Every structure is written in structure tokens, then in C-alpha cells.
Amino acid sequence: MIENKCEAILEKHYEKKGSIISILQDVQETFGYIPEDAVFWFAERLNIPASNFFGVVTFYAQFYLKPRGKNIITACCGTACHVKGAEPIINRMRADLAIAEGEDTTSDGQFTMEKLACIGACSIAPVVIVNKKVYGSMTPEKVSRMIKEYEKSSPR
Ligand code: FES
């Protein structure tokens, strides 16, 4: 099945003489992330070392090697947010979502937790972003309530 989808992407790019980046963009759009098997498939078919693909994937923040959750919760870890208590907020998020250390997505695929450097909203630090919506002056309690609200709209 992965082969059929990769074949369709390849056909499109043969015609357009696509670059590694545009192939990877299509792979991510098709699968929601970049499956390693797809990278090896394209590497073999195009006779390009897989390391070239992985080099691009790891360089650009827009590419993901693992499936992402339906909801993306991003905590700012810039200096202002750190000073105003980002760490306890992140710990609460991890505990409430039951995301294991070293993981970033809930086992049911509903939530992915990310950290970012300063997002330029220091005046309302600490900041958390959920699905592109920005929440300022967060506390562990507020983040807990917010997660419950999102869980209601995305039952696990
Ligand atoms: S440090 Fe978090 S918004 Fe600037």
C-alpha cells in the first residue's frame, strides 16, 4: 500500500522534475508524516542516498518522522516563558496527557506536545499554543483545564 502511494508521488515528480523537498512535502501530505519506509523507497527508485533525504527531513522543522497527534500543544520555552514558569506547565501537560518521557504523542494519537523557543509573545508569558491558538499567562492549573476542554472535543 505504501508503494502505491509512493508510486503516485513519483509519477507526479517525474513529470515536474521535482526536488527532494517537494517529494518530501508530498510524502508528508499523503501520510501525515515521513515514514522511513517511504524514504528508503524513494532513495532506491531515484538512486539517491537515503541520507540525502534524511538530511533534508532533519534540517527543516516542517518535516516529521513520526505521526503527529490530531491536536498540537506547543509550550514556549524561551527565556521569558522559562522565567515565568514554563517548566511546571510542561510537566503538568505531560502528566495530564500521560505522555511518556522521551515521547511526544499520546498513545491514542489525539495529542502531540512540542516545545518551541520564543514565539514573540513574551509580554503574555508563559505562552502555550494549541492548534495555532495562542494562550497567554498560563499556569499549570489553566493548562489542565484547557486540556480537559480539548479532550471533550476530541474524546480519547
Ligand atoms: S519567551 Fe515565550 S513568548 Fe517569548
Image (tube, helix red, strand yellow):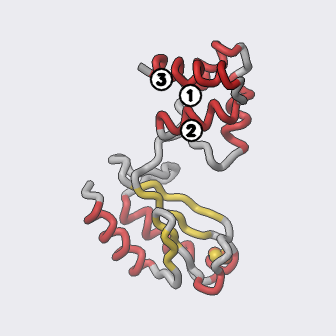
Mark before the other along the chain sequence, 3 or 1: 3
**Does residue 82 show up?**
no
Labelled disc at residue 150? none
Tell which of 134 and 104 is nearer to you: 134
Q: Which residue is mark 3?
A: 5
Query: Which kind of residue does numbered mark 1 sit on?
Result: Glu
Where does the image place residue 128, in percent across and percent down from the top left?
Answer: 52, 72
Quadrant position of the C terminus in the picture:
bottom left
Mark before the other along the chain sequence, 2 or 3: 3
Query: Which kind of residue does numbered mark 2 sit on?
Result: Leu
Labelled disc at residue 65? 2
Q: Which residue is mark 1?
A: 36
Calculate the distance from the C-alpha at mark 3 to the C-alpha at mark 1. Answer: 14 Å
Label 3 beta carbon less than 8 Å to ligand 1: no
Q: Are marks 2 and 1 in contact (CB under 8 Å)?
A: yes
Residue at 49% across / 77% down in the picture? 135
